[in-house]
Each structure stands twice: as structure tokens, then as C-alpha cells.
Amino acid sequence: MSVEVEALSKKYGSNQVINQLSFQINKGIFGLLGDNGAGKTTLMKILATLLGFNEGDVSMFGYSLRKEPDAIRAMLGYLPQNFDFFPDATITESMNYFAALKGLIGQRRIQEEISQRLVEVGLEEHAHKKIKQLSGGMKQRFGIAQAMLNLPQLLIIDEPTVGLDPKERIAFRNLLHSFSEDRIVLLSTHIVPDISSTCDNVLILKKGSCLYNGSVDEAIHKVEGKIWLVEVDKGQLQQLSNESRIISVVRKRGLMQVRLLDNSPPEKYGEYTLETPNLEDAYLYISDNERGP
């Protein structure tokens, strides 16, 4: 069970959006990180069979995306970044519509499937509400539920936790973990903790090229011994920002507590501590220092 992308390229006119991209996804949750314009959404639309490509090849579970898109669609679940539906349809009516599109057969099976998905996202008590009556977070949970209908072998989700509160986000992460035990989940988000808490592997894109493809732990290892915490006054902050990559600044006791990335400790600014790195630190380091092919 795998998704294999080989030398994939996509252009819009003369604009190269995806550039000779190659990677493989196996069972589990695979994270996709990149700045705006990195090509994440374009890549996900290609994998969801919604967008063609110019060069390269994609194979999913032994099927060619170029030659056998219908076979692949039958195995897909997809949640786009901006998801909405007919405003006057209820959640139940909408889920029945998506079930029909996915080829679910048998009224009893369809109702059991819909009920299970709504329970998983906490919408069972709102099944008869119209889409226009839902909050932003509820719409997002509805989108997740429809994507999981028929238990797809590949679940593609773009910014799934936007609009979810912290409690909903944690519940969603737990749901992904259980769902991905025998399936592939491709998760694209700008919320780095969603990647670090759910994914074993991550692909980092920049301008359509791969900067990093590997384990989350190995990415974090790249910045071991490079993350520092130091307190400076306002006058020193600008000088420090010219010398090091500042990750965050927090006001504390009239000073600026600065988390920074640098190969060397900020000795000239007084006391400092070496911090334990996280994936956000690694992402900034790789984005600044690595080069794609």
C-alpha cells in the first residue's frame, strides 16, 4: 500500500508551481508543510484527481493517476481547504449525497456509515441542521465526516483544523491516529503542532520543490544545539534580529524573552539557555538553509 510520486511537474503558463517532485507515502499519516505559494494545494489537487500535471508520474495502490483516475477516485477521500455545501441542505441530506457519489449501496449500510462518521466528529446531535446554520468549526467537522465516508484508502485533507477550537483539534488528531492504522492520510497544514503531534514523516516544500522528505524526528535533530533563549531589552532586540534567526519574542518583566536559532550561543547578551528544539524550529531552519533539487 503506497502512493508514489516521480518527477512530478506542474505549470500554469510559464509559472512552475511543482518542480520535479518525487516522494513516496506509505501507511500512516504523512505531513505536508510549506509557506503560502509553496505548491501544497496544487499538489493535493493533483493527487485528488482534480488537476492535471505536465510531467512525471503518480501511482496509487498500483494504479496510474494519468491512465486510471476513476479507479483511484473510488479509493479517495478529500477535504479541500475551502469546503462548503448547499446552504439549505441538512447534514443528513448532504451526507447521503456524498454517500451516493462514493458508490455506497444499501440504505441500511449508508445510514450506519453516516451515523458512525457523524459520531466520530461530534455532529450526531446536529444531523438535521442546515449547512447555513452551522458554525465555522461545525462546517469543518462536517467536511471531515464526508471525506471519511466509505473508509477511503487514501484520505487527503487540506488545512483540516482551521476553525476548530483547541478541544476539537485534539479530538481530530486522535481521530486521525485511529483512522490511519491501515490507511494513508496526507495532511497539509500551516499549524505545525498538528504535524508534529500526528505525523511520523513530513515533506517540506518551497516554491514547488522538495526541501526535506523524511521523519519528523530527523528533521528536529537538524536543529539540536541551535535553539537558544535569551532576555534582552528593546534596544538590543533589533541588533539581535540582525545577527540571528528570531523564532519568537515574549515580553517578560519589562524585557524581551527571545527564542532564536543560531549555530552559536548569544554570549554577548548575557545569560542564555539551550532549548529543546521542536518541529517549528526545524521547519524554519530547513526553509532558510536547505535547497531543493
Image (cartoon, rainbow, N blue to C red):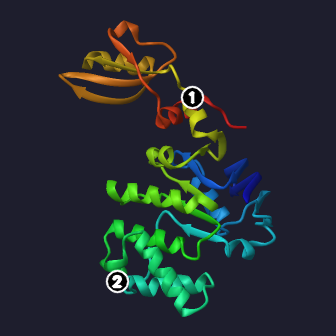
Q: Residue, x 52% and y 56% (percent of image)? A: 177
Q: CA distance from mark 1 to mark 2?
A: 48 Å
204 or 178, which is in the foreground? Answer: 178
Mark 2: give few (<14), some (14-19) or many (20+) Cα within 10 Å: some
Mark 1: give few (<14), some (14-19) or many (20+) Cα within 10 Å: some
Query: Which quarter shows the C terminus?
Result: top right
Q: Residue, x 18% and y 22% (percent of image)? A: 254
Q: Earlier in the sequence, mark 1 or mark 2?
A: 2
3 or 284, which is in the foreground? Answer: 3
Query: Which quarter shows the N terminus?
Result: bottom right
Going by the numbered disc 1, the residue's amino acid type is His
Q: Residue furthest bottom?
A: 107
Residue 36 in view, yes or no: yes
The disc at residue 202 is none
Find numbered disc 2 in the image and state the secondary structure of the residue it sits on: loop
In this rendering, is residue 165 above or below 118? Answer: above
Residue 150 percent location from the top left of the image:
58, 76
Residue 183 in view, yes or no: no
273 sits to left or right of 253: right
Labels 1, 2: front one:
1
Q: Residue furthest left?
A: 253
11 sits to left or right of 147: right
Q: Which residue is mark 2?
A: 130
Going by the numbered disc 2, the residue's amino acid type is Lys
Q: Which residue is mark 1?
A: 221
